[in-house]
Amino acid sequence: MSAATQRFASIAAKRAAGEKGGIASICSAHPMVIEATLRHGAARGSDVLIEATCNQVNHEGGYTGMKPAGFRSFVEGHAQNASFPLDRLILGGDHLGPNPWKHLPAADAMKQAADMIDAYAGAGFTKLHLDTSMACADDPAPLADETIAARAAALAAVAEAAVERIGGEKPVYIIGTEVPVPGGALEALDHMHVTEPDDALRTVEIHRQAFSRAGLDAAFARAVGVVVQPGVEFGNAEIIAYAPEKATELVAMLGRIPQFVFEAHSTDYQPNEALGALVRDGFAILKVGPWLTFALREALYGLSHIADVLAPDPSRENLPAAMERIMLASPDNWRKYYPGTPDEQRVERHFSFSDRIRYYWPAPDAQRATQTLLEALGDREIPRTLIGQYLGQLDAAVAAGRVKPTAHELLIGSITRVLDIYAGATRQ
């Protein structure tokens, strides 16, 4: 294993020895998020964990158009530009299973999932989250726990065989599927179920048995994390913060499975103290994604207003107007997530915590609109008076000299503010 993967694989042992640190899992394929993440890691001398999801990157290309090997090249190119050492980089695959093909019969969907995880393992991804919890077209719903575990073990067998065939690092595994809806909840949040301790124990034991039946005891020994619900979530305009007192029994149960730490999904927008408490309590892997692109969008919209002041051009469509036009023309990525009146939907399209706008930044029209904005501002230094007006959250960092007041660096600085919060929580 690389040094970074070895350190990650020992995350549970370190916790058992009294270390209370963790690691943030950066779940984004946006080039500026990747750039900011690797620059942040280089500046701190810390390991960086970047993950792609089954819908985002797969053997068919996913919605990014990248296969796992292509995503690896994309990230490593940014690492080279950031002078980030590759031996501190961990690449992961999230929710690897049949989800993108669950409309197919189970045999066909699992064949696709197997091809996907073969591509991930073959491309050298060393943190693999096995998620086979979804029912396929001919499955009963919900799936039996034993079926979920058996399918997870089948995918692990494919990953192990890929590494044997190609060579390279044996992966570490994350099991468990009791997670919030990817990208945030769809309904109003008035309560949040915390995983029952017995359910978490059952998940571990059933997977242990399934791996053993498949002759994969050595692979299961590299399972280091179990996904549970600690009681955190965000919706379009709501955030449920971690309440340690509600997870006391779940946290205590972790002592009975010393091989594992907890992986917490949807930790975006949590208060600083809540993130720190999660890590302290054993949720050592903190997934974050929409918060990073939300911070990017905040800075882009602020720069659009600044460009209207510094470089007025009546022929230039401002960025919020361009994104509104693009999202209205292709509503599939937001319509079912944003209920309410037309006015409420308009606000949510741009400002929702679920940040469905992130799916539109790769669109050619969105890229052109963003590039036009950045070209209008160029490399000029933006006056602090305008930063205070439109990017107030960055004013202190600019004043202290930590962020250069140019358009590109302000975008990186906005993302870095979120990365700093996670670095503090995980003590990276």
Image (spheres, rainbow, N blue to C red):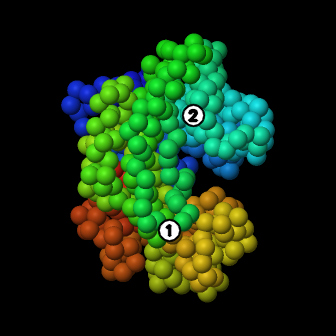
Task: Report which quarter residue 320 is drawn in.
Answer: bottom right
Viewer-side residue, 326 vs 413:
326
Secondary structure category for the residue under label 1: loop
Residue closest to the eye, 402 or 69: 69
Q: Which residue is mark 1?
A: 188
Whether residue 188 can be seen here: yes
- Residue at x 40%, y 78% (from the top left corner): 390
Residue depicted at x 29% and y 30%: 255
Q: Is residue 44 above or below residue 321?
A: above
Residue at image mark 2: 145
Query: From where the camera sits, is residue 93 visible?
Result: no
User: Whole-percent x and y of residue 356?
Assistant: 58, 63
| Furthest residue in direction left, as rendered | 18
Query: Picture quarter containing residue 426?
Result: top left
N-terminal-most mark, 1 or 2:
2
Asked whether disc 1 touches disc 2, contact meaning CB atoms under 8 Å apart, the reply is no
Is residue 428 depicted above or below 33 in this figure? above
Spatial separation of the CA atoms under disc 1 and disc 2: 28 Å
- Give the amino acid at mark 2: Asp
Relative placement, left or right, of 105 versus 279 is right
400 displayed left or right of 123: left
Please provide percent x and percent y for residue 263.
42, 40
Question: Measuring 50% from the left and 47% from the top, which residue is drawn there?
Answer: 179
Q: How packed is label 2: few (under 14 Cα within 10 Å), some, or many (20 or more)?
A: some
Front position among marks 1 and 2: 2
Element assignment for label 2: helix
Q: Amino acid at mark 1?
A: Ala
174 versus 347 height, above or below: above
